[in-house]
């Protein structure tokens, strides 16, 4: 059994800076109908940090992630309790506009989902159009380039920006979705198993993209891949739902600590691949 | 050790044979048989009508389509006015029904709370189950007395557009109400009630198939519900919108009883939809076939043949649109 290596650079949590925005979940519980799937989850996701959510299937990681940008409530029977604080303000507060909150907390999904009726360039600017953000023609071209560069896709598509986004490979589509999410300039980027439908090369490109984004954007990533969690994240939270109980965090801490010196035996078993 | 050279196998595609189980075979045959029966029936109706139409078409030739009057006693027979009336009634039904069907479908699939969704679907489907004679009675006794005021308003304000012109003084205090009754407009309103559930059902089922991934992508970008509908649901549902509308048009073209009850027959080619009197193909057939002689019956069946071809074309085009759109195909990955 080889233990998973954690990069040295990934150990130290960066000092929070004044303009950076972090996310904090306080006593978050979730239900689908009467079935409770999360119980009292508390997790601080500091600014400029990549937080990985790991755990076996059905432990509530994705539900938790979707609570972080209010996508959870789009499911008809879904309910939640607790608070999610973006820069100290509860995003579920009655004065908070759901569209504004989702714009500040972007999301990349498991399955790449570019808009098929739109070109690559239109896909990047779709968020601006949808949120009614006006950009001039010259700014638009700059923005498309900047976002595609940040998404790690620019070199592959710069000559065919007007072609449909559906024509790209799965990995390219996913990076297009990242570029699209970045175009509205979010403070936080949530990623729900962004690489699970991708081949190893595309996965590596997305991971590089995450590393490049980390200094500017707070990233929360759900992943089933332990190596990936170790490679990309500085902080890690292990979720578990034991037989018949709602999911919750067993252990959270720096990625190095969770992987190399877990406090809880269940965490040790999971990160070393003994169950899950 | 010497290698024995085996003769090279021929490199051509193999004929692959599939062995079906008896149950599979039986099901396959009966399904094919029933499917073919439907096609054969449709073809038989078409052939029957076509065959019956031969004497009439032979006798009147092209003038059957250019002559507007229908006076069998004077040996003058033509479909021109009837076809114009048919299209007018159908178009009125579509212009009124399309926005209502689209909005209803969008409301049910996108906005309605889950608790009332099922009820709304049932209510709209129930509209389709109401016999058309009921719509005819409703149109004649309830709708018409109200709708003539709309007709008058349109004639007063938009009368300079030929289709809204009525040959009377609409502004007069004692306006000629009977000039506004029994018109293509009122018949079209009644028919629209019948085509709404059809168009709505097609649109609704297509909207419901709009991929969740794309919907969530739009919402997660901070889009409003309406923004999401505009970028995801409507482009995806395009085929269904067009197809559902065409199916509704096909239904509207053939609607008989309600139209027969409301309109008063008039064989003039006129664009004035608000004015009393018009005629549609199906109403013509239903109204005249009771007392028709053999030759007149052939003429009516020819009218039926024309209507059959018209609706066949419209429905085929509708099917092409629905099938060709992404809405009909499975979504990839």
Image: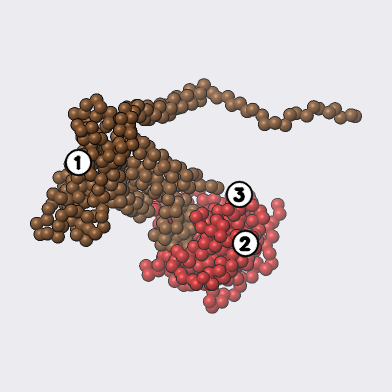
**Residue B43 position within the rendered picture, expressed as x and y whole percent measured from the top left:** 39, 29
**Residues marked 3 and 2, same chain:** yes
* Nearer mark to the viewer, of 3 and 1: 1
Q: Relative to B314, is B273 above or below?
A: below
**Residue B12 position within the rendered picture, expressed as x and y whole percent measured from the top left:** 70, 31
- Crowding around mark 1 (Cα neighbors within 10 Å: few <14, some 14 to 19, many 20+) is some
Q: Which residue is mark 1?
A: B265
Task: Say which quarter of the image contains residue B175.
Answer: bottom left
* Nearer mark to the viewer, of 2 and 1: 1
Identified at 34% across, 41% down, the residue is B250
Q: Which residue is mark 3?
A: A275
| Circle 1 chain | B
**Residue A53 position within the rendered picture, expressed as x and y whole percent measured from the top left:** 56, 59
| Circle 3 chain | A
Identified at 53% across, 76% down, the residue is A19
Chain letter, colour red in render: A
Callout 3 secondary element: loop
Q: CA distance from mark 3 to mark 2?
A: 47 Å
| Circle 2 chain | A
* Nearer mark to the viewer, of 3 and 2: 2
Callout 2 secondary element: loop
Q: Relative to A36, is A42 above or below?
A: below
- Crowding around mark 2 (Cα neighbors within 10 Å: few <14, some 14 to 19, many 20+) is few
Judge from the rendering whether residue B138 lies leftward or rightward of residue A221; answer left or right.
Answer: left
Q: Which residue is mark 2?
A: A159
**Residues marked 3 and 1, same chain:** no
Chain letter, colour brown in render: B
Q: How many marks?
A: 3
């Amino acid at each position: 059994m080889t233990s998973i290596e954690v990069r040295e650079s990934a150990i130290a949590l960066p000092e929070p800076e004044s303009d950076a925005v972090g996310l904090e979940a306080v006593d978050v519980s979730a239900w689908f109908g009467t079935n409770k799937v999360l119980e009292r989850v508390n997790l601080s996701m500091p600014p400029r940090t990549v937080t990985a959510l790991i755990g076996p299937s059905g432990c509530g990681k994705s539900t938790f992630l979707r609570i972080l940008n209010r996508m959870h409530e789009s499911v008809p029977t879904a309910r939640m309790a607790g608070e999610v604080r973006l820069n100290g303000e509860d995003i579920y507060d009655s004065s908070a506009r759901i569209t504004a909150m989702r714009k500040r907390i972007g999301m990349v999904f498991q399955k790449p989902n570019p808009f098929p009726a739109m070109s690559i360039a239109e896909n990047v600017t779709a968020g601006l159009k949808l949120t009614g953000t006006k950009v001039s023609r010259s700014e638009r071209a700059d923005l498309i380039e900047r976002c595609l560069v940040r998404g790690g896709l620019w070199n592959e598509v710069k000559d065919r920006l007007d072609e449909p986004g559906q024509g790209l490979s799965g990995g390219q589509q996913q990076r297009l979705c990242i570029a699209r999410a970045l175009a509205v300039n979010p403070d936080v980027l949530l990623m729900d198993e962004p690489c699970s439908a991708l081949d190893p090369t595309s996965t590596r490109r997305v991971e590089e993209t995450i590393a490049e984004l980390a200094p500017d954007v707070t990233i929360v990533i759900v992943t089933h891949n332990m190596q990936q969690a170790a490679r990309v994240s500085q902080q890690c939270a292990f979720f578990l739902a034991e037989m018949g109980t709602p999911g919750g965090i067993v252990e959270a801490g720096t990625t190095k600590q969770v992987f190399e010196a877990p406090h809880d035996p269940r965490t040790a078993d999971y990160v070393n691949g003994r169950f899950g | 050790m010497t290698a024995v050279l085996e003769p090279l196998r021929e490199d051509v595609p193999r004929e692959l044979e599939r062995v079906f189980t008896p149950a599979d075979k039986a099901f396959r045959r009966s399904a094919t048989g029933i499917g073919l029966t439907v096609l054969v029936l449709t073809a038989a109706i078409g052939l029957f009508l076509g065959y019956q139409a031969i004497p009439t078409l032979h006798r009147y030739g092209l003038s059957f389509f250019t002559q507007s009057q229908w006076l069998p006693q004077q040996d003058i027979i033509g479909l021109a006015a009837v076809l114009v009336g048919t299209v007018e009634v159908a178009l009125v039904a579509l212009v009124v029904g399309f926005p209502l069907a689209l909005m209803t479908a969008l409301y049910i699939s996108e906005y309605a709370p889950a608790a009332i969704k099922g009820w709304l679907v049932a209510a709209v489907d129930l509209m389709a189950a109401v016999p058309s004679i009921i719509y005819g009675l409703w149109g004649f006794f309830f709708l018409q007395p109200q709708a003539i005021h709309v007709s008058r308003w349109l004639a007063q304000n938009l009368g300079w557009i030929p289709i809204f012109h009525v040959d009377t003084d609409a502004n007069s205090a004692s306006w000629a109400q009977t000039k506004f009754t029994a018109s293509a407009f009122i018949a079209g309103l009644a028919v629209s009630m019948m085509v709404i559930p059809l168009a709505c059902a097609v649109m609704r089922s297509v909207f419901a198939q709009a991929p969740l991934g794309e919907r969530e992508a739009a919402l997660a970008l901070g889009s409003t519900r309406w923004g999401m509908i505009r970028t995801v649901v409507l482009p995806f549902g395009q085929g269904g919108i067009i197809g559902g509308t065409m199916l509704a048009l096909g239904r509207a073209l053939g609607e008989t009883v309600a139209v027969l009850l409301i309109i008063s027959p008039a064989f003039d080619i006129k664009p004035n939809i608000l004015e009393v009197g018009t005629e549609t193909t199906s109403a013509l057939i239903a109204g005249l076939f009771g007392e028709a002689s053999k030759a007149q019956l052939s003429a009516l069946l020819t009218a039926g043949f024309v209507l059959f071809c018209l609706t066949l074309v419209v429905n085929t085009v509708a099917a092409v649109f629905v099938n060709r759109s992404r809405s009909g195909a499975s979504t990839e990955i």
